[in-house]
Image (cartoon, rainbow, N blue to C red):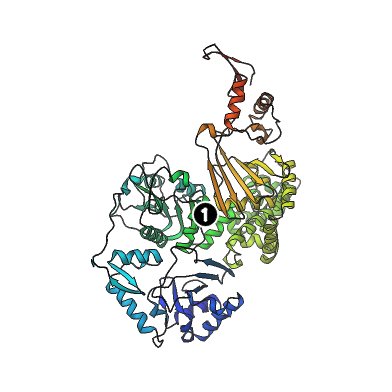
Amino acid sequence: MLNATEFKQLVKQVPYKKVLPDAIYLHKSALEYAPDKLNKFIYAVATALKINEQEWDLVKLAKNTFRLSLLHYPDFFNESYPALKTAITIDLEKLSHRITQYQQQDNPPILHRKETMISPEHECYNTFKSITEEGEQAGLYEKPRLIGFQQTWLRLIEKKGYHLIDGRLFPNASGQQQEEKTGIEREKTAIVRHELSAPMKQLAKHGYLSGEYTVFDYGCGRGDDLRELEAHGIDALGWDPNFRPEDERVKSDIVNLGFVINVIEDQDERIAALLSAWELTEKLLVVSAMLGNEQTTSQFKAYKDGVITSRNTFQKYFDQSELKHYLERVVDEVPIAVAPGIFYLFRDKIEEQRFLTKRHRRHHQWQQLTTPTPVSETQARLLITTNLPLFEDYWLHCLQLGRIPAAPEFSQSDQLKHLAGSPRKAFKLAESYFDANEFQQAQALKREDLLVYFALSQFDKRKTYVSLPDELKRDAKYFFTQYQQAHEEAKALLFSIANTELIEEACIAAHKTLPASVLNQGHSLILHKQWLVMLPAILRVYVGAAAQLYGELEPIDLVKIHITSGKVSFMIYDDFENSAVPFLVERIKVKMMEQDIDFFDYVEPLRQPPLLCKGNYLAPEHHLYLKQSRFDKRLAKLLQISTDIDTNMPRIEYEQLLNKHFKKVNNYSLITNIRNPENQLVQTKSISKS
């Protein structure tokens, strides 16, 4: 078998191939001319994955990574520009593979320059070469980045004044190139911002705007984000075709393609913008686009695959799943949802693992509640007492990691080693001084966090041990001895979320231990998002799987775990924190079996359901808990509902019941409305006190 280094060396020795910046392509008929060891290895990989030889025609070999793809072009010899039917991408570092089907897609990838993928001795070589020469003479290869998809290619042929007959190019009757002209005013899509855009806020939230990374804003509009980043001392540049067309497009650690692809009406140009941004990316590409549904688009005039807005701009409204699949198809990387309409695509895979690990980590907040009196009986306690800030900082690191920090993980390791002799001795001193039970609890929490992370990472296939960041390697070795053990336990945990009995047991157990929640027996568990980290591991994975489709849960207020249907609902209310009766403004239902999301918005006030008995979702120590609970009891009595269950009531029914009793809600009080014969409000009187 081959290792990564030998694989890269052998790829360079392949004589007949189509060369791209990151990979080479060749037909399997040309494999006999490749190094024998590489030839046998490719067939061995196909055999190991039980891929029949009739199920692949081309092989794509990465030039810089240990990766190959087996591609099925059944019409390779029959069509001039055959379409891809199936792609099997094999990551030999991670020992994982991904199968992508293109049969049902209206714009699959296609092949050009087929003569480069076979040997010159092949009987089809001259025919393929003449087909390529036709395209070159017609000017079809001037922008090679734009021609990789079928519909793009056909539109280009038409624009150049040609059409295809039996796979060969013939001039149109007029012989003139067709240039489509529209009155769309793209420059109007650039809005004036008074705060960071949503994708930039996500970058700030995840620590990517600390100044450590260079940032490039591709399609920066008027440059409002750039001005704010520059004010913070961040190395940030940008380019925009309308407002900064002369600025240079430069490679950067982070590239932001913020709400750009949704305003480009030309599908070919849309693909080109995405690929151009990806080529500039060193570590992370952030892509965002507008989300919408039929209700959204029905307000506007349909145009191509989007609409023309009232401002004469184009908008392509995606749904979350559609956007994810689009990015994956064009960039050939697995995108990570961080918010509705916002995805991360990592070119740096180590950075990707760091990001994913942090997403599923609970942060142990430790506070020193007492100040021990210095004790001179033992040298150890005196040592700690005289260096208390150092040891407090060290103990907090131990709690956060759930283990003894390695030297690079604690900035004052040298000072600590000088005082205590070794990291283990330093830990023993700290453990005897602080609370050892607290550390044991931190260990248990960290191990569970790792299991949740490894379970959710199964969605992107298993990562090899060597591909993990150093800190994650230490965690895997410390908490599981072997990485294989962590993988097996995480796999079992992931599969367990399909067991409705286990989900129900976990929901019942969580309801008993959470500070606040509502359990609808046999149906669902509802809780505030702040309690998600306190859920049993199986429910954290259950909700985490849904969040991987939706993105970050920052705007969410309540989470509803459906016990039997394999769904999770996220609810957003208007002013949940301060309103006695918040109203639902958006509900997101993630259907994990279908890997799809339904968005329900409640724009019209009369359609917004009220959240009754909000106190059920507040912890007893919450500063508004007592006030909310007293109000809930009065309101429940008036509406004749129970205070300890989830009551769904339409807004109009809620308003009618209040009006029936001449009541309305004012803060945390019920106000009586006294009306004159003309039904005009003349006086209000509070009948309850907060």
**To which residue does mark 1 refer?**
321
Res 628 → quadrant: top right
Residue 180: image x %, image y %?
29, 57
Please state, as top left, top right, bottom left or bottom right, where the C terminus lies in the image: top right
Residue 262: image x %, image y %?
41, 51
Asked which secondary structure carries label 1, the reply is helix
Q: Residues within 10 Å of mark 1 (few under 14, many from 20)?
A: some
Q: Amino acid at mark 1?
A: Ser
Can residue 634 be seen in the rendering of this structure? yes
- Front residue of this view, candidates 65 and 266: 266
Q: Residue at x 34, y 42 (%)?
A: 311
Q: Is residue 258 above or below residue 628?
A: below
Please state, as top left, top right, bottom left or bottom right, where the N terminus lies in the image: bottom right
Res 406 → quadrant: bottom right
Q: Is residue 516 above or below residue 11?
A: above
In the picture provided, is 22 more to the left or to the right than 674?
A: left
Residue 575: image x %, image y %?
55, 33
Q: Residue at x 66, y 65 (%)?
A: 483
Can residue 140 be seen in the rendering of this structure? no
Residue 98: image x %, image y %?
56, 67
- Front residue of this view, candidates 2 and 425: 2
Res 148 → quadrant: bottom left
Residue at the limit of the structure toward the bottom, as seen here: 121
In the picture provided, is 502 more to the left or to the right than 32?
A: right
Q: Is residue 383 above or below residue 624?
A: below
Q: Is residue 118 above or below residue 186?
A: below
